[in-house]
Image (cartoon, rainbow, N blue to C red):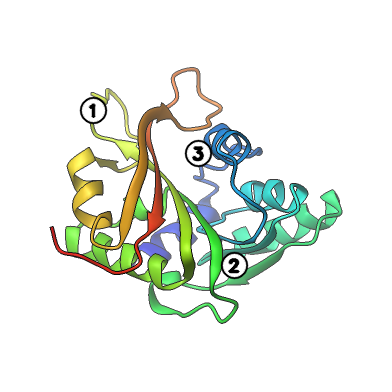
Amino acid sequence: MSIADRYQERYQAGDTPWDVGRPDFNLIQVVTTRPIHLCKALDIGCGTGDNSIWLAQKNFDVIGLDTSEIAIKKAIEKAAGAKVKCTFKLVNFLTSTIEEAPFGFVFDRGCFHSLSGEEERRRFAEKVAAHLEKDGLWLSILGNADEKRLAPGPPQRTARDIVNSVEPYFEILALVSSYFESNHPNPPRAWVCLARKRSSSFEG
C-alpha cells in the first residue's frame, strides 16, 4: 500500500492523531520570530488545513496539498468558515509538479519523515528545491529518533537522516529539537528543520 493510500485509509477510519485542530506552534514560532517574509507559500501534506489557514491569515498566498479527499474537503470547509482565501488541491506532491511554482516558502509537518528510505527523502528534498525560488525557505517538522518511545507515534528520523537528504539541495539554517503540536499530555518529540535553497546543488 502506498503512503497516499495509507493516509486516505486513516482519514476514513478517523485515525488522525496529527490533526489537532490548530496550527503547529513550531510553524508560528519560526514564521513570526525569524521572520519569514510574505510570499507564495506551499503546505505539503496540509491535512485539514489548520497550518495553511494560519499562514493565509498572516497574508501569505497559500496553496495546501494533500492526497486525502476527506482532508481536502475539511480544509476547504475550515477556510470558508474562517473567511480566509486559501487554495487546496488533491495532489500527490511526489508525483506531480505544482504549476503555481516557484514559492518563497514551503512547509511540511510530518510529510518528509513519512518517507522511509534515504533515496526517497533525497528525491523529496530535490523536488522541494525545484519548487522554490532563489534563496527560498523550507520548514519541515519531523519525528525525532532521539526519543525512546513506549507507545506508537510518528516516524522517527535521526539528525544524520535529515542532513544526508537535505544538504545536497539546501543549506540548513537551523535544526532544533522540539515537540509536535499535540492534544496528548506527552507530545512526540520532533525535529524542526529550517533550510534555504542552495544556488547550486553539491554532493558532500
Mark 3 or 2, nearer chain start: 3
Instruction: Using the image, determine if residue 56 lies above or below residue 125.
Output: above
Q: Residue at x 32, y 33 (%)?
A: 152
Mark 3 or 1, nearer chain start: 3
The alpha-carbon separation of the residues under discs 1 and 2 comes to 33 Å
- Tell me if residue 29 can be seen: yes
Q: Mark 1–mark 2 contact, CB under 8 Å?
A: no
Residue at numbered disc 3: 17
The alpha-carbon separation of the residues under discs 3 and 1 comes to 21 Å
Q: Nearer the viewer, residue 34 or 164?
A: 34
Q: Residue furthest left?
A: 204
Q: Quadrant of residue 138?
A: bottom left
Residue at numbered disc 1: 146
Of circles 3 and 1, the one toward us is 1
- Tell me if residue 158 can be seen: no
Instruction: Using the image, determine if residue 14 lies above or below residue 117.
Output: above
The alpha-carbon separation of the residues under discs 3 and 2 comes to 18 Å
Q: Residue at x 66, y 47 (%)?
A: 50
Q: Mark 3–mark 1 contact, CB under 8 Å?
A: no
Q: Quadrant of residue 104?
A: bottom right
Circle 2 — which element?
A: helix
